Image (cartoon, rainbow, N blue to C red):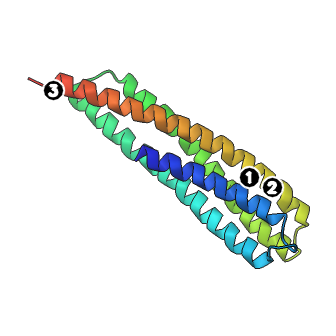
């Protein structure tokens, strides 16, 4: 599951970047409609990716906590998984809010409520923030995965007769 989530994180980042660069071609070879549909798809996939990652941390954190309590292992493992979850939740939730805000303000730029440059600069910020969130999420996913294996080994060793 960790590999799938990492793939989703990178794919959502690439899709957001593609829509960003696609936006500069609007009017030349790309229609505004295509940009809007692509942006909605990228937003949906990015939100899905971050939310799945957050739910994964909630589930694995609970599994690690239950294994530690049942086998009477060191509670530092619970603290470690909570730390990973905390980092991923903070940046993941903020990334979701930033990408959704950018999409909504993109609609405002299209209807001329906001100048296009507001959407353009927010898009740059959205890409950079999502890149940061993806890097942290991937790092935490890998560390939490390895922690889960370590706890599993200790659990098996402790409960074997």
For disc 3, the marked residue is 159
The residue carrying pointer 1 sits among few (fewer than 14), some (14 to 19) or many (20 or more) residues within 10 Å by Cα, namely: many
CA gap between label 3 and label 1 equals 47 Å
Position of residue 146 relative to residue 100, above or below, is: above
The residue carrying pointer 2 sits among few (fewer than 14), some (14 to 19) or many (20 or more) residues within 10 Å by Cα, namely: some
Can residue 54 be seen?
A: no
For disc 1, the marked residue is 126
Residue 122: mark in rendering = 2
Could you tell me which secondary element the residue under label 3 belongs to? helix
Image-quadrant location for residue 16: bottom right
Percent coordinates x, y for residue 56 in the rendering:
43, 47
Percent coordinates x, y for residue 74 in the rendering:
32, 21
Image-quadrant location for residue 96: bottom right
Can residue 81 be seen?
A: yes
Disc with the residue nearer the chain's start (3 vs 2): 2
Q: Are marks 1 and 2 in contact (CB under 8 Å)?
A: yes
CA gap between label 1 and label 2 equals 6 Å
Residue, x 41% and y 35% (percent of image)?
145
Percent coordinates x, y for residue 75 in the rendering:
35, 24
Does 129 sit left or right of 156 as displayed? right
Does 81 sit left or right of 40 as displayed? left
Percent coordinates x, y for residue 45 in the rendering:
58, 61
Position of residue 63 relative to residue 124, above or below, is: above
Residue, x 48% and y 49% (percent of image)?
5
Residue, x 87% and y 60% (percent of image)?
118
Q: Which residue is farthest front?
A: 29
Disc with the residue nearer the chain's start (3 vs 1): 1
């Amino acid at each position: 599951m960790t590999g799938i989530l990492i793939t989703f994180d990178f794919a959502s980042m690439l899709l957001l970047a593609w829509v960003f660069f696609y936006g500069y071609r609007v009017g030349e070879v790309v229609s505004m409609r295509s940009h809007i549909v692509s942006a909605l798809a990228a937003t949906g996939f990015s939100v899905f990716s971050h939310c799945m990652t957050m739910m994964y941390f909630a589930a694995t954190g609970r599994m690690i906590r239950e294994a530690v309590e049942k086998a009477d292992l060191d509670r530092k493992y619970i603290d470690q998984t909570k730390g990973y979850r905390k980092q991923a939740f903070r940046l993941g939730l903020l990334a979701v809010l930033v990408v959704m805000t950018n999409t909504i303000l993109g609609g405002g730029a299209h209807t001329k409520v906001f100048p296009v440059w507001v959407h353009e600069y927010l898009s740059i910020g959205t890409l950079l923030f999502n890149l940061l969130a993806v890097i942290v999420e991937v790092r935490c996913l890998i560390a939490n995965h390895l922690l889960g294996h370590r706890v599993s080994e200790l659990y098996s060793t402790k409960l074997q007769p």
